[in-house]
Every structure is written in structure tokens, then in C-alpha cells.
Amino acid sequence: MHESDGEDEFLSCPLGPISDAGRKMGKQTSELSQQTPSNSLLKTRLVMKPVAYPNPQEAVVIAATEFLMEETMKKFDSSHDAHHVRRVRKTALSLAHSVEPKPDLLTVELAALLHDLLDKKYVPRSASADPFSHFFPFFKDLAEKTNGEIDLIGDGRAENISRIVENVSWTNERKLKAEGGWTEWHETCIELHCVQDADRLDAIGAFGIMRCAAYSAAVDRALHVSKSDPTWGDSAIHHFHDKLLLVRDRLKTPAGRRMGDRRHQFMLEFLSAVDEEYNAKP
Ligand SMILES: [Fe+2]
Ligand SMILES: [Fe+2]
């Protein structure tokens, strides 16, 4: 019930189904602008109309990033698979369209696609420590693929994307705030906020519950133990109290907070059902 509301928000997103429709729009616009319409006013309008995001070169970059993402996420469990990343990408772009000033959509989309490739839960510290160096050859390759038209290293977006990847995680935010490492950039980077909110929204609500169970199974963690049990702190149910129930109040975009309210409510209903079933007397 709650998630269908979210889907409605996605359907009303100007991007529509992001990859296909957006790419088609870009293609149609560029094809149309090459034609010679008899009506000169129409021609002027077509030529002046900006090419919709993503333009053909951006589509090449997105497709290559999606391929890298799919190849990498194959190795992780279903709590952190390509489906999770695609949901995050979709929500991040939807949030990006809801905020002012408008963020750079390519930065948001690429950061969303790459955000979990170096997740510390899955890759060694040596690989996750420096996302910019890690992705540098990939960004370089993207510039070659687009004949230099999209040079993310040259225009500074590669550095920003890498910084978002490095800072998207909840644990990292908590650590930085505790250690005084939270900066003006963390506070104001709207592209970071869109990706962070989207990732956190997928950690709560119905999908969050499924993902918490899936990750617990992958690391062989108990789903539920009573609060008095000494292993409570290492159970899936503890994770709701330690993180998931706190997420709503840390969402940064207005639209993200609206989505978070519904998902938070659903988790509360789920947790009271868990208590009710656990304490049920025959
Ligand atoms: Fe992650
Ligand atoms: Fe994630």
C-alpha cells in the first residue's frame, strides 16, 4: 500500500521510465533538429529546444556505468544487488527533479549507479579507501568513448561523483559528525543529498525490511532474539532500533522526507506485528 504511492511519484517524474524514454527523447530531438520543416517558426522552436537528459553522449556514459555496476554487484548478496542500485538510481533522479536549485543529473545518476561498488561491507579497505583513484581509469575510458565530449575528470564531476560514493553511507556520516569531519560540502551538496536519501529510503519500509532479512541471512545473523538475550545487539531486529528507525529524521530532501514518513510508519507496523507474534499465547 505504501509503496504504490511511491510508484505514483516515480510515474509522474518528468523522466518517465528513466533510461528508455529519456534516451528516446534525446534521440528524437536531435533527429528533429536535423530536419528542414517548412514552417520557419516551428524550425526555430525545434532548434532552440534543449536536448532532454540524457543526451546521446550522456546515454553512452550511463550505459557503460550501468554495465560496470551490474558486473560488480553480481558478486554481492541480494541486499546489495543491481536491483537495489536501480531502485536507488530511480529514486535519486526523482528526488533530483523535485529540488531547487536543480542538481547536475548526470552526477546524480552516475553516483547512484556507483554508490555501492566500494561498499566497505563487501570490498577490502585498500579498494574502498580512495574511490577517485579506483574509478580514474573508468572515467578516462568514458572520455575516450565519447570522443572527449564528456570529460568528467576535466570538468571536475569525476571528483564530485567519487566524493559522493565515499560519503553516501550512514555509518560514514555518523563517524564524520562524531569526529568533527562534517563539512560545508556535506551540508550543501545537493547531488549527495539526492543519492543519500535514495539509498536510505531503500533501507527502510517494505524494501528495507526485505533487505535487512537478506543481509542477515548472508552474514548468518539471527533475525530475532529477545531484548534480554546477550546477542540482541547482533540481530536483525536490533538493526531496526540502531539505524532503520532513525533514518527518517536524517533524510535531507523535502520529497525524501515525505517518502520516508510512509516507510517509517510501515516499519512501526511491522515491528509491532513482530512483538505481537513473539509474545502470542496459544
Ligand atoms: Fe551500501
Ligand atoms: Fe546502497
Image (cartoon, helix red, strand yellow):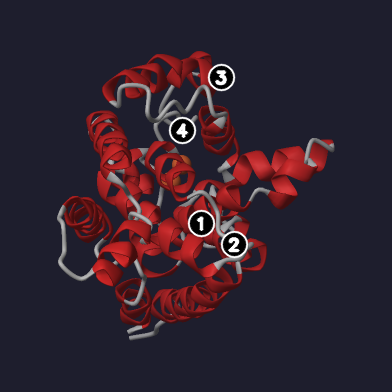
Counting residues from the N terminus, which is met first, the one under dot 4 or under dot 3? 4
Lateral position of residue 100 relative to residue 10, left or right: right
Give whichever of discs 4 and 2 has the lower sequence position. Answer: 4
Question: Are discs 2 and 1 less than 8 Å apart at CB?
Answer: yes
Residue 44 vertical placement versus 192 (above, below): below
For this view, does 233 lie left or right of residue 47?
A: right
Q: Nearer the viewer, residue 153 or 117?
A: 153
What's the residue type where badge 2 is placed? Val
Disc with the residue nearer the chain's start (1 vs 3): 3
The residue carrying pointer 2 sits among few (fewer than 14), some (14 to 19) or many (20 or more) residues within 10 Å by Cα, namely: many
Q: Which residue is drawn at the image coordinates 71% and 45% (left, top)?
A: 186
Q: Which residue is mark 4?
A: 119
Q: Dot 3: what SS?
A: loop
User: Going 29% across and 75% down the picture, which residue do you hit?
Assistant: 11
Image quarter where the N terminus lies is bottom left
Give the number of the disc on residue 247: 2
Residue 77, x across and y down, in percent: 28, 39
- Do the CB atoms of the residues marked 1 and 3 lie less than 8 Å apart? no
Identify which residue is drawn at 32% across, 80% down: 8
- Answer with the quarter of the image where residue 177 lies: top right
Is ligand 2 within 8 Å of the beta carbon of the residue shown at mark 2? no
Whether the residue under disc 4 has CB within 8 Å of ligand 1 = yes
Q: CA distance from mark 3 to mark 2?
A: 26 Å
Residue 131 lies, in percent from the top left, at: 52, 23
Kindly report the distance in space between the C-alpha atoms of the residues bearing marks 2 and 1. Answer: 7 Å
Q: Residue at x 36, y 82 (%)?
A: 5
